[in-house]
Amino acid sequence: MLSISSIFALSKVDPYSSFKILLNKLKEKWLNIDQEKSCMMKSNEEKKIDRRALLSGIAGAVGGLIVSAAVGWFAKPVTQIVKTVTATTTLEKTVTVERTATATPVIKPTTLNFWYAATEVGSPEYLDEFILPEFYKKYPQITVVHSYYGSSYEAYETALKAALSAGSGPDVFNTPGPTFTMDYIKAGWLLPIDEYISMFNWDKKWRKFALRVHEGPDGKIYGCSGVFEGMVLYINKPVFKKEGWSPPKTYAELLELCEKAKKKGYIPIVMGYSDWPPGWEHQYSAALEAAAGHDKVYEALTHKRSFDDKSFVDAIAMFKEDLWDNEYINHDAFTIGYVDFCSRLSQQKAAMTIMGTWVSATRELVSPPYDVDVMQIPPWKKGVKATIAAGVGDSFVINAKCKNPEAAMAFWDFYTGPEVAAWAMRRGINQFIPRNDITIPEDA
C-alpha cells in the first residue's frame, strides 16, 4: 500500500536539534496530516513504502545509479533466528475497563502470545522492566508470553508467515509497516478491528491517517500504526568533542567532515543493513529530500513529475559519487548487521550515521551505550530547505484466529499509549505514536 500521508517535510527550523526539539518537529507534521494535501490514502499494492522499505517513496526509480554492492540482497538466506521467551503467571480475575465508548469491553482471563522484532520499545528488557508490569496493573487477568526475534525482520517474517500459514502463530504481532501488512490481509491472517475501535475509543485517540493506512481491500481496518519516524543525521558526540568538530550546516561542511574523519581513521558515516537489506532504500529517501527537495518528491509521488527527472538522478549520483565512491560510507554496510553498526558508534570507530529516528531506541544494545546527538540532514543543494523524510513505522495487528480479541486490543491500546510513550521518551527513545492522547514530557 502506498500511503502518501507518510511523506512530509520540515522546514524553517534550526538544523541542529536536540531529541526533544526533533520530537516537537515531528509532532508539528502529524497534527495536520489529516487536513494536509498529502493525506491521500489510495493504495498502490505494487509499491512497499514505509519505514523499512522507503520513507519518501523511491523504489529504484533511478536504478542505473544504484551501487553495485546492493546486488543480490534478497537472495541472502536466513541463517539465524534469535528468540527469547518470557512467561508470567495468570491471575484469575476479571475486570471491566472503564472507558468512554459505545461499549465496554469485558476481558476474560487469557494468555496472549506476542511475537515482535525491532520495534522502538521492542526488547525483552523494556517489556519486563516497565511495559508488562504496568500493563498487569491494569489487566491482571491477561498473561503475555513474548518471543523476541531481534533486529532481523527477514528471519522474523520467515518464522511468522510459516506459523500463520499453518493456522497457528501469535495472537498479537508487529509487521514492518502498513504496506507489508497488506500481504497478511490478503492471506486472511489478520483480524479486522472495526468493531473494537469505538469500544476502545480509538476513533478519538488516534490520528485518522494512522488507522486508515491499515485499510484492506474490503474497506476494513486491520491494525494501528507504530512510531512516527524520520531520517536524520546522528553525530557521535565523544568523537566530535575529541576532535573539536562542529555539526555540519551545509552539504559542503558534511563532505569536509567526512574527509577529516576518514583521514583520522574513523568511518565517516557508518551503516549496517545485513539483517534488513530493504532498509538501504531509506538512504535514497534521504538523498532525494536533501538534494531535490520535498516539493519535487511530492510531485513525483502524485504523478506530476517523473522519477527520471534530472533532479532525482542528480541526487542519487551525489549519494553514490560523493559518499559511496569516496568511501565515506563503510563498504561492508551490507555484510554487518544492526548490532555491529551500533558497536562501531559505541567504540567510537565512526563519526556519524544517516539513519532513522529509531536509532534512539537501540543505544543500549551495546556496551557501553553509544552517545549521539541528532540533527536534520543538511540540504545538499542551494535553494533546498532542510527537511525530514518521515512516515509511520511498524504496524501492530491481531491474528485472525485470536480467541480473545478484546484482550489483544487492550494490549495494543496500552503498548501504543501515553504511559509507555512518556516512559520511553524520558529515556531518549522515539516512541512518538500518532495518537491524540500522547504528549512530549517536559523532562524528555
Image (cartoon, rainbow, N blue to C red):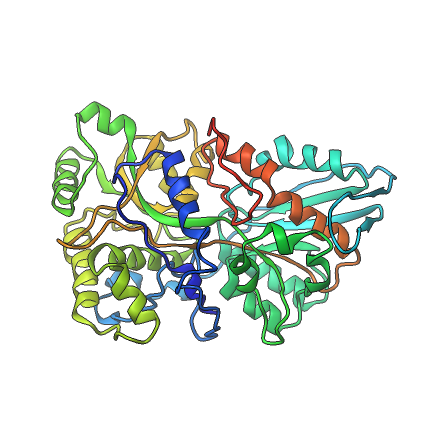
Q: Is residue 257 left or right of residue 182?
A: left
Residue 340 can be seen, yes or no: no
**Residue at image location 20% in from the left, 72% down from the top:** 309
Residue 355 position in % (x across, y down): 34, 47
The image shows residue 37 at horizontal and vertical percentages of 39, 65
Quadrant of residue 233 within the rendered picture: top left
Q: Is residue 215 left or right of residue 194?
A: left
User: Is 279 positioned to the left or the right of 236 in the image?
Assistant: right
Q: Going by the picture, which residue comes out furthest to the front?
A: 35
Q: In percent of the image, x 74 and y 45: which residue is there?
A: 99
Residue drawn at the location 88% of the way across and 39% of the way down: 92
x and y, in percent, of residue 367 in the image: 43, 28
Q: Where's residue 254, x and y in %?
A: 17, 43
What residue do we see at 21% from left, 61% from top?
A: 292
Above or below, 181 against 330 in this view is below
In the image, is residue 295 above or below residue 274?
Answer: below
Whether residue 403 can be seen here = yes
Identify which residue, 272 or 285, lies in the foreground. Answer: 285
